[in-house]
Amino acid sequence: MTKPSETQRQWLHIAACSFALLLPWLNASGAFALAVTAFIHNILLLPRYAPSLFHRNERLTQGIGAYPLMVALLILIFPDRLHIVGCVWGILAFGDGFSNLVGRNLPLVSLPWNPEKSLGGMLAFTLMGTLAGFFFLWWIGPASTIEHLLIIAFIAALFSSLFESVPTPWDDNITVTVVAAVLTALCWPLNFSLYSDPTTLMWLGTAIALNIIIAVIAKMMNWVSGGGAIGGLIIGTLVLVMGGIDFFLLLISFFLLATLATRIGFHEKALMGGAQENQGRRGAKHAAANCAVPLLAAVLFGWFDGADAWLAIFYCGAVATALSDTVSSELGQLFGRNPFMPGSFQLATPGTPGAISIEGTLWGMGAAALFAGLACITQTVSLNALPAVMMGAWIGFFSESYITAKWKEEGIDVSNEWMNTLNTIIGGSVAVAIVFLTQT
């Protein structure tokens, strides 16, 4: 039986989208002020007169707090394209809201990659998200064909529902907003007459088909879970379409090398208690943590038509960092003789969060060097950028170990997925900074 407070929460989630009807008469400043006002209301006033709407220990970056924050962020990113804000807002409100309502009352069947989500909820998300997104594109946006608006809304809602159905370390309000916003913005300039640009449609279909094949093979080989296969399908398709074949080959190289490192000595690592969970199968949360930042770089690279070489360097540095971190962790606990905590240099047991070893560090550095070489072979970056990619990866995965160890000493508990996201940001940023400093 659905709790009344949860039902009320979802209806409030949906009803709040009614404010998007005002966007045609508001400029960016007025819309942003409205979102900020809603955020202040939700965190200061709403808990006082409707405490049952809040989950226990709910943070501001979750649920009711995150909702208006993400709308405000959308307005800052698209101040002159409020129709995109309205579309995403509609998908977030109606798609996510009805997904919860229908999923609780008419689940149909649990999804194989995430038993906590249902087919009924996913279908409701796609249908209601499409209708809401289409309506707000029509209500707010410049004149366009019904077909164009409907296909954009459907693509954004469908992929958002897929991403919402897989377990990730982030709140649904964040993931749905990011996925829907990226796809709506990317699809808006495209001509969706379905017959005018067969080359583009053929490339998109090829990318989807290829990634479906790879996802099925990875699932059959037990390299990934069901959620990991879906997450990889989405990430791989977007990287191939937006970043091109070079970015995609590097992504596949990362996946194969990381999987190999996970499989080597798995039984021994399991006996030590440090083996990858779920029998070594990577899930959606792992794909999201390691690939969300590189994916954003690939999307921006394609968005700017590949004109910005800095994004290619950032992408390679971020993926190299993820590979280095995985290899150093997986092989370090297997071959490392005297793991220690960086900073304090105190000895630690294998598998301790933040602990490193000389052997593991060398394995990670070697993986970064190998990946940087592959980036040069595929001509994703120039030979001059090879040292920067390696250094970015080295600093990225070592920084994660140092920060994790430091926070552990201070009693701060942060999930491994969040730290993986952080180290890809550091690795990519350092790679770009090194190239920039050496070229000026």
Image (tube, rainbow, N blue to C red):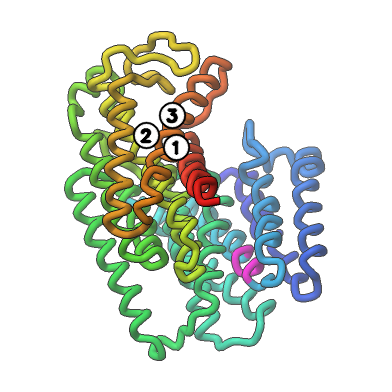
Q: Secondary structure at mark 1?
A: helix
| Above or below 350: residue 258 | below
- Which label lies toward us, 3 or 1? 3
| Above or below 204: residue 427 | above
Tell whether 64 sits left or right of 258. Answer: right
Q: Residues within 10 Å of mark 2 (few under 14, many from 20)?
A: many
> Which residue corresponds to mark 3?
398
Q: Is residue 386 visible?
A: yes
**Among the two numbered marks 3 and 1 on one chain, the one whose residue lies closer to the N terminus:** 3
Q: Which mark is residue 420?
A: 1
Q: Is residue 124 visible?
A: no
Q: Which mark is residue 290?
A: none
> Which residue corresponds to mark 2?
325
Q: Residues within 10 Å of mark 1 (few under 14, many from 20)?
A: many
Queried whether the magenta region covers residue 86, the answer comes back as: yes
Q: Does the residue at mark 2 contact the one at mark 1 (Cβ under 8 Å)?
A: yes
Q: CA distance from mark 2 to mark 1?
A: 8 Å
**Among the two numbered marks 2 and 1 on one chain, the one whose residue lies closer to the N terminus:** 2
Q: Residues within 10 Å of mark 3 (few under 14, many from 20)?
A: many
Please, what is the three-letter code of the amino acid marked with disc 1? Asn
Q: Residue furthest top?
A: 346
Which is more toward the observer, 68 or 203? 203
Q: Which residues are magenta?
A: 84-89
Queried whether the magenta region covers residue 17, the answer comes back as: no
Q: Does the residue at mark 3 contact the one at mark 2 (Cβ under 8 Å)?
A: no
Q: CA distance from mark 3 to mark 1?
A: 11 Å
- Report the residue at 59% width, 43% height from top: 3
Indicate the position of residue 439 as horizontal and vertical percent values: 51, 51
Q: CA distance from mark 3 to mark 2?
A: 8 Å
Please, what is the three-letter code of the amino acid marked with disc 3? Phe
Q: Secondary structure at mark 2?
A: helix
